[in-house]
Image (cartoon, grey):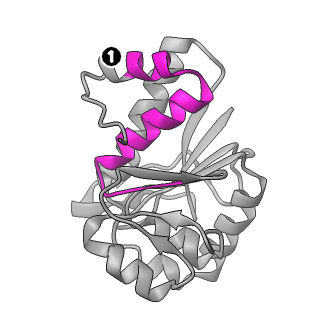
Amino acid sequence: MNIGIYIYDDAEVLDFSGPFEVFSTAKRLANNNWKVFFVAEKNKPVLARAGFSVNPHYSFADHPAIDLLIVVGGVHTHELEKPAVINWIRKNAGTATKVASVCTGAFLLARADLLDNLTVTTHWEDQTDLASIFPNLNVIANKRWVSQGKFTTSGGISAGIDMSLQLVAELISLEHAELTAKQMEFQWHKNT
């Protein structure tokens, strides 16, 4: 299984590093064939929030097929204006088995027309904007993540870790997700 995490300049660091750690740890504990990787538009370092430099594993031009696509948040407004990015997200979401967003990554999925008429969430600070810009979405508060069909959206930053653990539970088992959280010494906040 290929787990591709889309990163870009000014992406929130924990939005991509948290899910990367969850899926990498789950893979190690399961000794399975998962491949977890970062994809950026171009094959060059990405400067995430606060100047955190990240080398993507792949670019749009050379990544393997993606089974689970994760689109992260951060300062996402420039990404919304890039047709190549939105088209890439739409195309890869169409072939992926599961698609998820962390924080304001939901804006990118919505711009790609993937979330129409779905119940979604994002960072608490951005929920009003998401609902205003994309009125076809049912944006809700007070949930760490929301799943509908193959799409899962999460609240901000650390909520992406909780969502990723939930995806591990769906892909492997609840017990494995709990073991992963324990290995990470992370208190998993499950939706109630």
Depth check: give the residue in front, 116 or 18. 116
- At horizontal 36% and vertical 82% (from top left) the residue drawn is 129
Image-based side of 94 in relation to 128, left or right: right
Residue 141 percent coordinates (x, y): 33, 64
**69 up-or-down from 3: above or below:** below
| Point 48% across, 17% down: residue | 176
Q: Position of residue 139 (x, y in %)?
A: 44, 71
Q: In the displayed structure, would residue 115 be above or below residue 7?
A: below
Q: Residue pushed farthest left?
A: 50
Residue stretch in magenta: 152-180
From the viewer's perspective, is 190 left or right of 65?
Answer: left
Q: Quadrant of residue 49?
A: bottom left
Residue 166 within the segment the image draws in magenta: yes
Q: Amino acid at mark 1?
A: Gln
Q: Residue furthest right?
A: 95
Q: Quadrant of the C terminus?
A: top left
| Secondary structure mostly taken by the magenta-highlighted segment of the chain | helix
Residue at figure coordinates x 34%, y 24% from the top left: 181
Which part of the image, by quadrant, shows the N terminus? top right
